[in-house]
Each structure stands twice: as C-alpha cells, then as structure tokens.
Amino acid sequence: MPVPYRIGLLGLGHVGGALARRLVEDADRIATAAGRPIALEAIAVAHPQGRSAPAPLRPANEVVGDAKLDAIVELMGGLEPAHTYIKAALQAGRQLITANKQVIATHGPTLARLGPLRFEASVASAIPIVETLAESLGSDRIRAVAGILNGTTNSILEAMGAGSSYADALADAQRRGLAEADPSADVEAHDPAAKLAIIAMLAFHHRIDPSQIARVGIRELGHAELLNARERGCIVKLIAAARTVNERGIEADVRPRLIPRDAPMARVDGAMNAIAVDATYAGPLFLQGVGAGPDAAASAVLADLVRAARDIPASAGALLASLADQPVAAIAPMGSNPPYPSAS
C-alpha cells in the first residue's frame, strides 16, 4: 500500500472544516487522484476547549514542528500569526499549502524561497488561475489581466442594480454569510487588490507591493451611478485590472467600472468570480467560476494537496521565489478608461 501523505491543518473554520470533511468523506477518490492516501494527522485551532475534530487537536507550534508531517495546510487567515507559522513550516522542511491572500500578496516571494509554497486557493477559490498563469502560460507574454475577484461586492452591486440600497444590500450579504461583520476589506477593495497583486506577479514576472495598487471601493456608489450605467447599456462591476505598458511599466487598480451588457464579464452574477487574461500567443482567455464559499476554497486547497502528494513542482511558488531579489515594481493607476470606463 502506498505510504500516506501526512498533513497538519492550521485552522478549522469554514474552509478548514470543509477541507476536513472532504478528506474524510471523499478519502478514496482523493487517494486515487493523489496516488496515495492523504492522512489528516493533526489540527490546530485557536480555542480547542470543547471542540470536536476529525484529528487530534494540538497547539499550532507543535503541528508546525512535527517532523513526521509532509505538509502543513494554513487556513487561519490574516497576516499574523499565519505568516509566522508559514515561515516556520517552510524552514522546517514542510511543504506549505495556503489560501491566505494577504500573506502571499505581501510576503509571497520571500516565503517561496524557503521551500515549496502552494497557494491556488488564494485567488478566486475554485478558478484554477494560479498554476495556470505560472505553468500553462508561464512561457507566454501576458499583456493584461482583469476580473471580478470579490464575490461579496459583486452580490451587493447586483442587489443594488435590482433596487436595493447599499445598506440593505450589505445587510443581506451579511445575513447570507457573504460579508463579514466588518465588510471594509471587501467594500473598500482591499481584498481584490491583494488578489490582483498575486496574479499580476504571476502574469508579469515583477514583484508587486499590494499597498501600491490604487483602489476605489463601492461605498460611495448610489442609484444615480447605477441608473446612468443602465441608460448607457452597461452595468457596474468592481473590476481589478492590471496591464503592462511598453513591456516595463505596470498599471493596476481596483475600481467600479461600466461593463457593456453584452460583455462576458457583465454576466458574472452573485458570488461568482471571473478573470480575463490577454496573452500574446494563447490569445484572450476567460475563466469563470465560484469565487467564494468553503467548498470552492477547499476544492482549490485539495488541488494543491494532490499536486504535493504526487511531487509535482510548485510552479507558482517557484515563480514567486524568482522575484524575491527584485525591487518592487512601480505601479501607476489605470485611470478612468482601460479596460472599461470608470463608474466613479
């Protein structure tokens, strides 16, 4: 029987719980895909008292330092202590799989130099964009990327377009679990800016500081802007976009933009995400799928786990590692026009 691939899990929230369930309920299917069983050996949670779990609950530092584990899966979220645990796991020789967009956008290149770092779930959940950019399109020349990278704001804008006020649309998104109690990361565009930084690094092969990406959120949008868009045959979407300029400069920003009703991006509804890639040789590509929710994120984490268990190289991690010694690229805002007219 093949030797199991043994993992430790940091975090048993919505995504961690979904992953743990898949590892138990779909164990045979996962083992077939991975070429060997994937065994969940230990779980770390912030408050273990009274918690039940499908594997022993242990302190995070013990899980990270366990030499018997092949990989650590970090699903805690946030910059700290997640960054510290990711760094320690890589330094200890573990493979590291994460969905943490903040850590990858901010520290990805320096972390990736320490060991195999996999982060498919950090951008657009179930859409396989990370390894696609690093591997399938790694030898192409990417001119631009643009997309809807935040399902929460996409749902809110859709509700507002149907007549709801911003406050009512936000409250409904919070009731449905799409928006946090503090929605600022979504509605002020910090979340899609971090995701844009990751895919722009993979697309353009330049190191990017997410704090340099200009962002305009959706708080200030009202019915007047949405009505004006409708009268112009458009709808409003929060678009994260980046492009190269003269093969050296980079323009990038996140802002509400007017999307023609007949454009594919206009038909991305609810919590769905979509990414358009303009490649020199592969041509225009459009990827759409579920960009939020525990099952979708767990699906992307499992994809990385299967690759790790099969010893498939971490292509996206290797690409980020190659950028670690680069200076941070200068980023200029895209402004009011490309790829679509600004709505604010």
Image (spheres, rainbow, N blue to C red):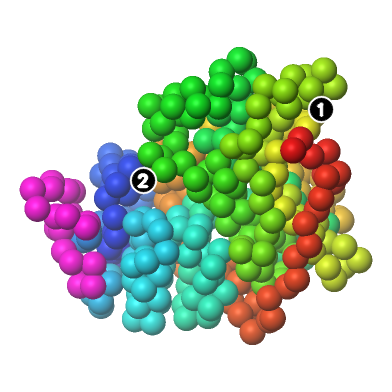
The answer to whether 1 is drawn above or below residue 176 in the figure is below
Residue drawn at (49%, 76%), measured in percent from left and top? 111
- Mark 1, residue position: 260
Task: Give the mark nearest the N terminus, 2 or 1.
Answer: 2
Q: Residue furthest top?
A: 163
Q: Main secondary structure of the magenta part?
A: loop
From the image, state whether disc 2 or disc 1 is nearer to you: 1
Residue 135 lies in magenta, yes or no? Answer: no
Q: Amino acid at mark 2?
A: Val
Which quadrant of the figure has residue 329?
Answer: bottom right
Residue 61 lies in magenta, yes or no? Answer: yes
Which quadrant of the figure has residue 130?
Answer: bottom right
Residue drawn at (18%, 66%), measured in percent from left and top? 59
Residue drawn at (67%, 46%), measured in percent from left and top? 216
Q: Quadrant of the N terminus?
A: bottom left
Nearer the observer, 53 or 307: 53
Where does the image place residue 97, in percent across and percent down from the top left?
Answer: 42, 62
Mark pair 2, 1: CA separation: 34 Å
Where does the image place residue 191, in percent across and percent down from the top left?
Answer: 54, 50
Where does the image place residue 49, in percent across and percent down from the top left?
Answer: 9, 53
In screen coordinates, is 251 left or right of 200? right
The reply to whether residue 139 is in sight is yes
Question: Element at badge 2?
Answer: helix
- Mark 2, residue position: 15
Question: Element at badge 1?
Answer: strand
Residue drawn at (59%, 37%), measured in percent from left and top? 219
Nearer the observer, 93 or 80: 80
Where does the image place residue 163, in percent across and percent down from the top left?
Answer: 61, 15
Q: Amino acid at mark 1?
A: Pro
The answer to whether 136 is drawn above or below residue 286 in the figure is below
Magenta region: which residues?
Answer: 45-63
Nearer the observer, 157 or 139: 157
